[in-house]
Image: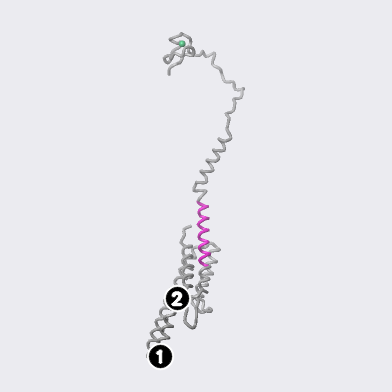
Amino acid sequence: MKIKCPLCDFENEEGSKFCSKCNILLIKPKAFAIKENPYVKKEKPEIKLDYIINKIDDAATKFHESREYNEPYERENKKGTKQLLGLLGSAILFVGVFAPIVSIPIMGNMNYFQNGKGDGVIVLVLAVISLILVLLKKFKGLWFTGLGSMAIMTFTFINFQMALSNTRTQMETELTGNPFRGIADMAMQSVQIQWGWALLIIGVVLLIASAAIKE
Ligand SMILES: [Zn+2]
């Protein structure tokens, strides 16, 4: 490092004791070196308030973006979604049991409950169990109630289709040559699946979705 002369600004070689231009003494005699007085308080470095605020703000931002902070929050969110789906699913399934699932000429609409005689009673019980499970946050049990309801509904639907085709076959044989056959045929054809099935299926799908969402 070159030594700049304080008088003439000439840059002298490292280690020079005198300026090679103006000959003044370049090194500071030891006697002039000012010793630090331990009794004189050093001025505290100024800590700016906005610097501190920024530091705290940075730390807070980091914390809010961290896994430790967000994980429990996300877990709660997912639990909320599961609970909402489960509540909707059990409610819709419950209502679906009392909604018309088939309309039959003369007899009118029939629901799944059938005054407590239908398979719908089991589905109704499963809907109530589902609701209790959701309220207790035991979402895994919804696999059982959801898939169980679906199995019973499939069973009912297949049974119904079989009964319908059996009746048709019976009519074919019994009503041959009967003048009312045409009317009977029309009546059979007007047997219609009703919107209650849609509710039952939506209810089951929501229950299974609630069970399937990972915590
Ligand atoms: Zn000089």
Q: Is residue 77 above or below residue 164?
A: above
| Residue 125 coordinates in the image, percent (x, y) | 52, 72
- Residue 21 relative to residue 95: left or right: left
Mark 1 and ligand 1: say if the CB distance to the nearest ligand atom is below 8 Å.
no
Q: How many other residues sit within 10 Å of disc 1, few (<14), some (14-19) or many (≥20)? A: few
Location of the N terminus (image quadrant)? top left
Magenta residues? 71-90
Is 83 magenta? The answer is yes
Q: Residue at x 46, y 14 (%)?
A: 9
Comparing 187 with 162, the one in front is 187
Q: Residue at x 47, y 67 (%)?
A: 202
Amino acid at circle 2: Ile
In the drawing, what numbered circle is on residue 26? none
Q: Which residue is mark 2?
A: 193
Residue found at the very far top of the displayed protein: 23
Q: Are marks 1 and 2 in contact (CB under 8 Å)?
A: no
Distance in Å between CA atoms under marks 1 and 2: 28 Å
Q: Residue at x 53, y 41 (%)?
A: 59
Amino acid at circle 1: Pro
Q: Residue at x 50, y 60 (%)?
A: 82
Is 7 magenta? The answer is no
Q: How many other residues sit within 10 Å of disc 2, few (<14), some (14-19) or many (≥20)? A: some
Q: Which residue is mark 1?
A: 179
- Hey, which quadrant is residue 179 in on the image? bottom left
| Secondary-structure class at tag 1 | loop
Q: Is residue 111 above or below residue 214?
A: below
| Residue 137 coordinates in the image, percent (x, y) | 53, 61
- Residue 124 relative to residue 160: left or right: right
> Majority secondary structure of the magenta segment?
helix
| Residue 54 coordinates in the image, percent (x, y) | 54, 38
